[in-house]
Amino acid sequence: MNPKMGNLIYAGKAKDVYETDDPELVIVKFRDDITAGDGVKTENFVKKGFYNSIISSKFFEVLEEAEIKTQYIKLIKPGYMLCKKLEMIPLEVITRNIAAGSLLKKFPFKTKQELNPPIIQMDYKNDEYHDPMLNDSITIALDLANQEQLDMIRDITIKINNVLKDFLLGKNILFPDFKIEYGFDNHGNIVLGDEISPDTCRFWDSKTSEVLDKDLFRKGESGVMDAYIKVASRILAKEDLKKWNIENLESEF
Ligand code: TMP
């Protein structure tokens, strides 16, 4: 039995969080809105929430199998994810395996330069301040997390990167970078939350370097949903697709 969906408790730029009749659980609704530039550029793509939710749930399942704690419990139906309630930490934890995006604007890296060991960067999740990059002293002074928690966040993030990079490579997808967010559960444990989707990651085809993520929207290019559907069709197993009555994703093109 799924818990009953209650009141809206948080509305983000692309997802809404609803309380349920179980105080420890929430339902995360993935909306079709897409934004860039701290919400300045917005659009709506039919079924984007559907695809991002099935992609995120697959990644969370892969991570749970690797014994990483996540807030994910299950996908009730595409677009609606049942999750443990977390107190989210306003940090955007970004991991970079290949130089791309804002890193190239801020520092003299070469385009597509391999970053080994990967860069882990933390930004303050705050649109008003345009998500500025943090260091540990600022993070601790802002009381967002203490040193021990930051060290733990880095350790878990490195493990997540290794698991997902290998999983994606097996699906012919490169993983240049991604952003994740953590929260505290009601025992004070640091738990992975939010989403892992083409909205929050860079995905490139490993053979052709075709872009398969939100960068297409950021750059005003077409084919955004086609790219998201490609990611879903590559990473989800046949049984996953059957579960949601989407046996043949490509036919949706
Ligand atoms: P960046 O190169 O623009 O800093 O982006 C790094 C990664 O973070 C990339 O995979 C996209 C993701 N990201 C978000 O999830 N939300 C954001 O607001 C931004 C700017 C990036």
Image (tube, helix red, strand yellow):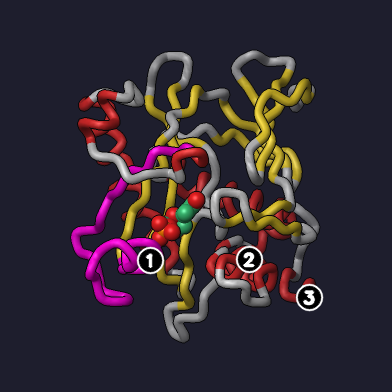
- Tell me where the magenta segment starts and ends, as one range: 98-126
Q: Label 1 CB, ligand 1: below 8 Å?
A: yes
Q: Is residue 213 visible?
A: no
Instruction: Name the side, left or right, on which 78 lies relative to 118.
Output: right
**What distance separates the C-alpha of mark 3 from that of mark 1?**
28 Å
Q: Which residue is mark 3?
A: 251
Which amino acid, by three-letter code, is at mark 3? Answer: Ser
- Residue located 66% across and 63% down the image: 238
Q: What percent of the width, then of the height, locates residue 214? A: 57, 64
Q: What percent of the width, then of the height, locates residue 105? A: 34, 66
Q: Is residue 149 visible?
A: yes
Identify the mark at residue 176; answer none if there is no mark. 1
Q: Is residue 188 above or below residue 68?
A: above
- Residue located 75% across and 27% down the image: 2
- Within 10 Å of disc 1 (Cα), the crowding (few <14, some 14-19, many 20+) is many
Look at the image and tell me in which quarter the C terminus lies.
bottom right
Residue 107 in magenta? yes
Helix, strand or loop at label 3? It is: helix
**What distance separates the C-alpha of mark 2 from that of mark 1?**
16 Å
Helix, strand or loop at label 2? It is: helix
Q: What percent of the width, then of the height, locates residue 229? A: 67, 67
Q: Is residue 40 above or below residue 111?
A: above
Please name whichever residue, 157 or 58, is drawn nearer the observer in this view of the structure: 157
Instruction: Name the side, left or right, on which 9 lies relative to 143.
Output: right
Q: Which residue is mark 2?
A: 228
- The quadrant holding residue 103 is bottom left
